[in-house]
Image: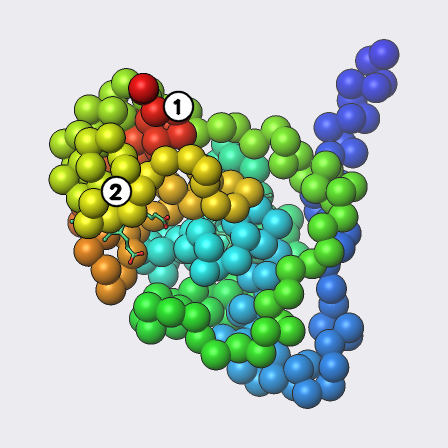
C-alpha cells in the first residue's frame, strides 16, 4: 500500500517526461529536415506543434503567449507555469528542449504576432502528433483544473467591459456571438487567450493588464467562467 502511493506519482513524472506520439526530425523528408535546420521560424512552428499542440492546440487557435514580452514568454517555456499542468521545457527544469529550440519557438510566436497572421511554413510541419490516448492520459489532460472564477463577478465585468460590443445577452453585435457551442477542445484556453490579448487587426481589444488592458488575471478568470456558465434564460 505504502509502496503503491510512492510509485504512482513517479510513474506520472516519467510519463510526462517522455510523451509518445511526437515525431522526430529524422521522420521528416530531407527537404523539410533541411528547412527546419536552417530556418528558426519553420523550426519553431514544427517544435511548437510537436511540444505544445496537445495542450494549446495550434498557435492559430489559442495564441497562448500573445501579448507577453519575449522575456516572460521565455521564462514560462523554460520553467513552466507553477501550479498548472505546464512543466518547464528547458533542460535546467528537466525538460528536453535546447536553448536554440526554445529560441526557435519564440521566434515562431513573435513572427506570427508581428505579422498578425501565420508565417508561411509548409503545412506538413504543422501536422499535430498522432494523439496517442495513452500519452494524453499520462499527461493528465482530464485533470486540468477548470478555470477557477466567480461567474457572478464575471457577469458584472462582462456588462461593464464587453456588452457594448457583444450585446448584454451575448448574442453578438460588433463582436461575435459569445454563446455555446464553442469551437475546439479547450474553449476555456481559447477564451482566456482571446480576452487577454485581443485580436490584432480587429476591434477586439486586449484586456490583460500586462497588455495595457484593465483586467487582472483573476478578473479574466471570472469573465471566462461567466461565459462558460449556462446563459441565464
Ligand atoms: C501538458 C499541457 C501543456 C503543454 C504540453 C504546454 N502547456 Fe503551456 N500551459 C499549460 C497550462 C495548463 C497553462 C496555464 C493556463 C493558464 O493559466 O491560462 C499554460 C500556460 C502557458 C503560457 C502562459 C500563458 C499566460 O498568459 O500565462 C504560455 C506562454 C505557454 N503555456 C506556452 C507553451 C508553449 C510554447 C508550449 C510548448 C513548448 C507549451 N505551453 C506546452 C499547459 C501546457
Ligand atoms: C470595441 C468592441 C469590443 C469589445 C469592448 C469587446 N470585444 Fe470581443 N470582439 C470584438 C470583435 C470585433 C470581435 C471579432 C474579431 C474578429 O474575429 O475579427 C471580437 C471577438 C471576441 C472573441 C472571439 C470569438 C470567436 O469566436 O473567435 C471573444 C472570445 C471575445 N471577443 C470576448 C470578449 C470579451 C470577454 C470582452 C470583454 C472583456 C470583449 N470581447 C470586449 C469586439 C469587442
Q: Does residue 59 appear left or right of residue 47 in this picture?
A: left
For residue 230, the mark is: 1
Residue 55 in the image, given as x and y percentages of width and height = 57, 46
Q: Residues within 10 Å of mark 1 (few under 14, many from 20)?
A: few
In the image, taking residue 182 as reference, residue 176 lies left or right, namely left
Give the image location of residue 122, x and y in percent.
58, 78
- Quarter of the image that includes the C terminus: top left
Classed neighbour count for the residue bearing mark 2: other residues with Cα under 10 Å, few (<14), some (14–19), many (≥20): some
Camera-nearest residue between 172 and 159: 172
Q: Dot 1 lies on which element?
A: loop
CA–CA distance between discs 1 and 2? 16 Å
Q: Is residue 206 visible to us here?
A: no
Is the N terminus in the top left, top right, bottom left or bottom right quadrant? top right
Label 2: which residue?
172
Image side of residue 52 versus residue 113, left or right: right
Secondary element at tag 2: loop
Tell me which residue sits at (54%, 82%) in the image.
39
Residue extending furthest toward the top: 1
Does mark 1 have its CB less than 8 Å from ligand 2? no
Residue drawn at 36 percent across, 56 percent down: 66
Mark 1 or mark 2, earlier in chain: 2
Find out whether the residues at labels 1 and 2 contact each other: C-beta distance under 8 Å: no
**Residue depicted at 63% across the width and 31% down the height:** 142
36 is higher (above) or lower (below) than 21: below
Give the image location of residue 224, x and y in percent: 35, 33
Amino acid at each position: 500500500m505504502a509502496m503503491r502511493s510512492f510509485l504512482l506519482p513517479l510513474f506520472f513524472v516519467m510519463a510526462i517526461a517522455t510523451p509518445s506520439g511526437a515525431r522526430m526530425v529524422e521522420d521528416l523528408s530531407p527537404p523539410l529536415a533541411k528547412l527546419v535546420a536552417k530556418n528558426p521560424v519553420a523550426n519553431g512552428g514544427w517544435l511548437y506543434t510537436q511540444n505544445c499542440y496537445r495542450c494549446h492546440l495550434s498557435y492559430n487557435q489559442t495564441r497562448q503567449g500573445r501579448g507577453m514580452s519575449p522575456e516572460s514568454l521565455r521564462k514560462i517555456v523554460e520553467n513552466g507555469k507553477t501550479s498548472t499542468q505546464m512543466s518547464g521545457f528547458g533542460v535546467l527544469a528537466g525538460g528536453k528542449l535546447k536553448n536554440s529550440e526554445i529560441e526557435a519557438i519564440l521566434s515562431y510566436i513573435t513572427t506570427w504576432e508581428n505579422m498578425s497572421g501565420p508565417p508561411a511554413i509548409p503545412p506538413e510541419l504543422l501536422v499535430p502528433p498522432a494523439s496517442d490516448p495513452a500519452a494524453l492520459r499520462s499527461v493528465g489532460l482530464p485533470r486540468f483544473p477548470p478555470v477557477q472564477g466567480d461567474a457572478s463577478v464575471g457577469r458584472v465585468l462582462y456588462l461593464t467591459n464587453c456588452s457594448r460590443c457583444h450585446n448584454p445577452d451575448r448574442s453578438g453585435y460588433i463582436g461575435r456571438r459569445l454563446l455555446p457551442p464553442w469551437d475546439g477542445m479547450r474553449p476555456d484556453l481559447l477564451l482566456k487567450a482571446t480576452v487577454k490579448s485581443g485580436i490584432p487587426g480587429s476591434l477586439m481589444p486586449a484586456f490583460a493588464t500586462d497588455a495595457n488592458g484593465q483586467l487582472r488575471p483573476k478578473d479574466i478568470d471570472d469573465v471566462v467562467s461567466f461565459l462558460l456558465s449556462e446563459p441565464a434564460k
